[in-house]
Amino acid sequence: MNIHDSGYKKLFSNQTIFRQLLETFVNQEWVNQLDFSTGETLDKSFISQHYRETESDLIYKVQLLNHEVYIYILIEFQSTVDPFMALRVLNYITNFYMDYIANHKQVKKLPAVFPIVLYNGEDRWTAPINLSDLIEQTPSLGTFTLAFRYFLIAENQYSQQALLKIRNIVSTLFLAESHYDVDVLETELLNLFSSETDKGAVSLFLNWFKQLALHGRIATEDYESLETIYRNEEEVRTMLITALEKEKQQIYHNGHLEGKREGHLEGKREGHFEGKIEAAQAMFAKGMEIELIAEITNLPEAQLKTLLSIKGKLYQ
């Protein structure tokens, strides 16, 4: 089993990551109408003698209005581009349809299947995406020529600048594959933890790096650096939330007793600030740099240096 193939398949089996792939990189109008909350990977009990699941392909079933839509993702890692990819994908889909008919005896029409080829190789993708380009044009078959095409997502077609503007899990994955820079990835992972509500998806992404390190695909120290960023951010954010909640409760109590809205609001602002400083002290004690603390707390570096020195004589 190829760890890269299975790792990618596990990543895109996550609904958040799957949704980001389609919403960010599939520029089709119908994508906006998909009900991603209904998304599910194909149940293996659905598979019979025609369609065979592999480590590098994935089928999602999603509701679009009152219809079921199937999204077929073929993950291509081969270093050499397969010129007959269009035929391969068409073969997968026709086998899927044969399987679908076998399991839905009363079906009148076949469901829509959208084929995606996700390529992460280093070479430029040169294979035709239209099947008709692989068929001799003599004699001319006109309307009887087979017409089929797949949707290509080639990671190396996106520049680092373009991916940095997107800033989600999938764009960060593409950055790691096509523009590997551990310093950039540290910053992007920090951003993901701050902005991504699905922390399980971020954790899954980090685990993918761990598997690459374990199998010698990336330097172990690179993974350890990314993990440290993630764990520190997780612990610090928990400290910050706890500190702010504590202050919030105290402020509410004081404001309620005093019965003065102005004093309450002022106390709330002070408590919010104090909570940030308390969290900043905890971060500094864990050895985090002032620049990173400033980014997390949204406090100016100069102010942090002064306040940390005054409150705990921590900053030298």
Image (cartoon, grey):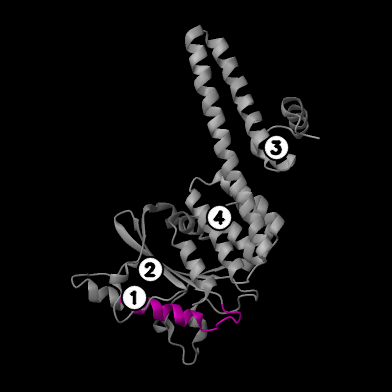
Q: Which residue lies under the disc numbered 3?
A: 294
Residue 196 coordinates in the image, percent (x, y): 53, 47
Q: Is residue 251 magenta?
A: no
Which residue is under mark 2?
A: 113
- Residue occupied by mark 1: 96
Magenta-colored span: 78-97
On the image, numbered disc 4 is attached to which residue? Answer: 169
- Which one is in front in this view, the residue at disc 1 or the one at disc 4? 4
Picture quarter containing residue 305? top right
- Callout 2 crowding tier (Cα within 10 Å): few <14, some 14–19, many ≥20: some
Q: Secondary structure at mark 3?
A: helix
Relative horizontal placement of residue 44, taking residue 143 as reference (left or right): left
Question: Of all residues shown, which one is farthest toward the right?
Answer: 316
Name the kind of residue labelled 4 in the image: Ile
Relative to 162, does residue 5 appear above or below in the rendering? below
Quadrant of image for the C terminus:
top right
Question: What label does residue 18 carry, if any?
Answer: none
